[in-house]
Amino acid sequence: MSVTSRPRRIALVAALVVAASAAGIVVLRARDGGAPAAGSTPMTAPSAYPEPAFLLGDAGVHDPTMVRRPDGGYLLAHTGDNLRLRTSTDLSTFTDAGAVFPDGAAWTTPYTKGSTALWAPDISFHDGRYHLYYSASTFGSNTSAIFLATSTTGESGSWTNDGLVIESGAGSDFNAIDPNLFVDDTGHWWLTFGSFWTGIKQIALDPATGRASNPAPTALATRGDTAIEAPYLVKHGDHYYLWVSFDACCKGAASTYRTMVGRSTSPNGPFTDRAGTPMTAGGGTEILAGHGAVHGPGHPAVLDDLLLYHYYADSGSSHLGLNRIGYDSDGWPFAY
């Protein structure tokens, strides 16, 4: 971008933000210091689902996950050919940053039937390295695998294949996709994952390698034969919150994905919803569902007080959704 064009772009962005705010569209701005501003004081949930934040640039994503970079700004990863990256400095404009594996990921093709599409990454930063867990599979199959890649920079092409974490197959009662890493206050690493079959599972990881220390998964949530997937585990206050998606993804504007949550006093459960129904018995408290021109908001991820998800427009295209998270007087989260 030339020096002379920069002021024009800044003026254009400012005008768009003002127009969006006037129209009632949510406009997010990055917070200083990296600490969440919401949640310390009880808030009141809005009476209707909020609209996603107004975003500019390359915000057409599916299954988003994001981390704050040590040197400032944000790095987002999402489903796509050889996994895809986006960057942002302000949570308003996102820029395509290339593929995680620009030369391909041949080790995944036994699970993808040769496709280069890799799914549902989970990105975090630990001990000076980015950690990226991701899925290799095909629709309707549980011949699936979760792999780990690491990088010191997060840049396209800089990622090292650190190998297989867990796999599933025809003899498994679970599906090894949709991973999410959670590091608890005692330094234990937990990988929560799962889709359909018998639902959401969890395994312990070895922090030294990032891979499974005990590959036998335990159950956290299920809906029997009904869709549940895309878990994300976070701690707020004294509770651990298990965010998941219910119902049908990946059908464009016909998608019925919903974002749900349950909570526990342990990262290993049991998790219950607001009504006290166990998540192992189909429980879940609804946070977001389709409304207006927002279809199938789901595959949640949480970064501090920020909720990420994807949704579909009327055209069927997928987009990044961003909203803030608040907590009511009973400690239950909501989007605003």
Image (cartoon, rainbow, N blue to C red):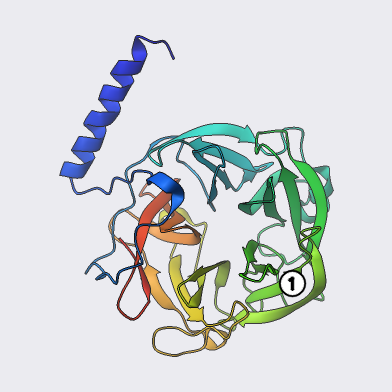
Q: Note whether residue 169 is visible.
A: no
- Residue drawn at x 43%, y 58% is 307
For residue 336, which quarter of the picture?
bottom left
Picture layout, residue 263 above or below residue 291: below
Q: Image check: 25 left or right of 119?
A: left
Q: Position of residue 264 (x, y in %)?
A: 52, 82
- Residue drawn at x 49%, y 38% is 73
Picture layout, residue 25 above or below residue 47: above
Q: Nearer the viewer, residue 262 or 327?
A: 327
Q: Image check: 265 left or right of 52?
A: right
Picture layout, residue 103 above or below residue 332: above
* Amino acid type of the residue tagged 1 in the rendering: Ala
Q: Note whether residue 159 is visible.
A: yes
Q: Position of residue 245 (x, y in %)?
A: 50, 68
Q: How many marks?
A: 1
Q: Nearer the viewer, residue 16 or 6?
A: 6
Q: Nearer the viewer, residue 284 or 248?
A: 284
Q: Image check: 132 left or right of 285?
A: right
Q: Position of residue 179 (x, y in %)?
A: 65, 62
Picture layout, residue 121 above or below residue 156: below
> Which residue has dot 1 on it?
204
- Callout 1: few (<14), some (14-19), or many (20+) C-alpha neighbours within 10 Å? many
Q: Work out which quarter of the rendered image holds the N terminus and state it.
A: top left
Badge 1 marks a residue whose secondary structure is: strand
